[in-house]
Amino acid sequence: MDKLELHQFLTGATDGDAITGQALIIRRWLRDLGIKSNIYAQYIHASVASEVQPLSAYRKRHLGDKVVYHHSIGSDLPSFLAGEHLRLLLIYHNVTPSVYFERSDPQRAELARLGQQQLFEMKDRTSLALAVSAYNARDLKVAGFANTAVLPLILSPAKYDLPSNDALVDILKQTGPNLLFVGRLAPNKKQEDLLKLLYFCRRLDPHAHLFLIGDRWEIGYDCWVEDMASEWDLADALTLTGKVSQPDLVTYYRNSTLYVSMSEHEGVGLPFIESMYLDLPVMAYGDSGVPDTIGNSGILFYEKDYEGLAELVHLLANDQEIRQRIITRQKEQLQKFLEPKVRQQFYKYLQVAGIQVPAAGEKPA
């Protein structure tokens, strides 16, 4: 009997990306069951070249084979998978609306529109569509998928149980309160609104500092944020780190005062989950999928009243009792994203999609 195979497909793969990270964890789960599983991508960053294969390396075995496809943007992949007559176990990570890129990156806006269109086109070839949040699941319902469920984004503790970078800790001790945001610099992430908050925070705490971790991804947006900081006399209060190593990322979480998000579109928001795990209180604008991720744990706000929010930042930075209450609630919310629980959900969904999962301890022939 042929060995059971279930491969995964991504548009792009890079180290530190939430989708790539989830695909790597799922590959490990499948291989633990004795299922042959590789990851294929259209675009592969050098950082994961040893883990991910190009589309040209894929070889189909049988007509109607099933594969896992992670969808988040328009690309050639849906057409490729259709041409191979593959059935899909779809994992939907949300497509950022094109409106956020119309003025800054028309090509990206077009890919966003294509991604939304392709979602509708895949429903007849999909055995089961999984959304990484309840918010994303609504898109699947609108697109007409018959069988849907939620598979939360996965947090694997081993990736975060790392020693801190002592040299970086010393640097972070020189400022405070330290506000942290993790995510590519892009219009939908609204890093410019974090600068507005920082302006008012500095009135209350002159040494307040904003750390923005993430790729300088959107054309010109990073420079615009830096120019804005200079015009408002905030250049010395802002650090754009670019991408950082995993130990440094963990160090920033552990040694920041507050995780703050003004983002106006998040399908889930892995940094919220990372903050929960590393005991960093979260304060976030409650749009899109953010309320589903944070639940009743962190601080959600629905109006960008920067002066009032700065006072809240000051309170959260100084009241240890309130901070601890938030951290305790976040630990409770975190449980839904931890690997053991999500792993069992995934195995159940494989069976729903018609993929026979071996019993515990049993390997397929």
Image (tube, rainbow, N blue to C red):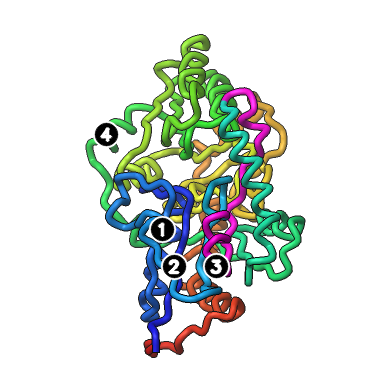
User: From mark 3 to mark 4, how far is it between C-alphas?
Assistant: 53 Å
Magenta region: which residues?
79-104
Q: Magenta segment: does it hold 97? A: yes
Check disc 2 and give the amino acid type: His
Callout 4: SS: helix
Check disc 1 and give the amino acid type: Tyr
The residue depicted at 66 percent of the width and 28 percent of the height is 308
Check disc 4 and give the amino acid type: Asp
Which of the numbered marks, if any, corresponds to residue 40?
1
User: From mark 1 to mark 2, how far is it between C-alphas?
Assistant: 8 Å
Q: Mark 4 points at which residue?
A: 170
For residue 167, side relative to residue 10 (left or right): left
Q: Magenta segment: does it hold 241? A: no
Callout 3: SS: loop
- Is residue 254 something one can see in this rendering? yes
Quadrant in which the N terminus is drawn: bottom left
Binning the other alpha carbons within 10 Å of mark 2 as few (below 14), some (14 to 19) or many (20 upward) gives many
Q: Mark 3 points at which residue?
A: 86
Binning the other alpha carbons within 10 Å of mark 4 as few (below 14), some (14 to 19) or many (20 upward) gives few
- The picture places residue 215, in percent across and down from the top left corner, at 42, 34
Q: Do the residues labelled 1 and 4 touch (CB within 8 Å)?
A: no
For residue 50, side relative to residue 195 (left or right): left
Question: Earlier along the polypeptide chain: callout 4 or callout 2?
Answer: 2
